[in-house]
Image: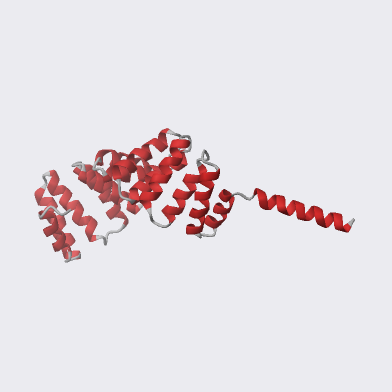
Amino acid sequence: MKNLYFILLLISSNLIAQTETSLSKGRKAYQEENYSEAIKLFEQAAAEEPNNAQVPYLMGRAYMDMSNYTKSAELMQRAIAMDSTRSNWIYELSLVYYAIPDYKKSLEYMLLAGEKGYKKTNDYLENLGNAYANVKQYDKAAGLYSEVLKRKPNDKELLYQTAQAYYNAGKYQEAIDNWDVLFGLDKTDAEILYMIGIAYQKKGDKEKGQQLCDKAIDMNPSLKNRRQQMMMGNF
């Protein structure tokens, strides 16, 4: 009886070993951050399961984690062509294109992810704003940043991004309004005061703008260099 039990255990263990696929082995290697081994196993899995979209997706993730963004994008595109319902895959592909960088494709796939049902969280909306800013569509970027600001109004980085987007869009009063809020959170930030002054000058109030810029330079003399850069069009 004991011998029979031992034989059954051996058979069971052999069956489990036989059912462990290249894909499952690749997943394990990926989780262990052994990306080169994971890729080898995923390549085997591609031959075994040519219609499984998970295979090129996971291989793309492995290449992404090794900072090979071009190869990652190629594989993720292949996965999405096989299964276009995965909004999270599409969103990840948009971030890969951002890293390449290919900002037009990043924006294209980020919008597609939203259309496919990707949840429009603060992070998604902020990244979409960044994508618009990267292709110089500053009005749309500012609108998205402003939407997120309603949910987290004292986020300093977001306030600056919003003001900068409005400034780049030529909407100087809106830029001033956001920089004013930011300066109210930290009255020692000379750079913000300086940008408020520049925005006033752009708006046409030269005297007030110059006074604010001078005050900012008194607080931080290194801002004289910023003035020179802006005069040369490097801002």
- Indicate the position of residue 112 as horizontal and vertical percent values: 39, 36
- Please name the residue shown 13% across and 60% down the image: 214
The front one of 63 and 197 is 63
Look at the picture and state if 117 lies above or below 46.
Answer: above
- Indicate the position of residue 30 as horizontal and vertical percent values: 52, 55
Whether residue 153 is visible here, answered yes or no, is no
- Residue 211 image-quadrant placement: bottom left
Whether residue 178 is visible here, answered yes or no, is yes
Q: Residue reaching furthest right?
A: 1
Q: Is residue 15 left or right of residue 63?
A: right
Look at the picture and state if 79 lies above or below 195.
Answer: above
The front one of 219 and 126 is 126
Q: Is residue 121 left or right of residue 146?
A: right
- Indicate the position of residue 46 as horizontal and vertical percent values: 51, 45
- Please name the residue shown 37% across and 39% down the image: 109
- Please name the residue shown 15% across and 57% down the image: 213
Quadrant in which the N terminus is drawn: bottom right
- Please name the residue shown 45% across and 35% down the image: 84
Look at the picture and state if 219 lies above or below 87.
Answer: below
Q: Residue reaching furthest front?
A: 47
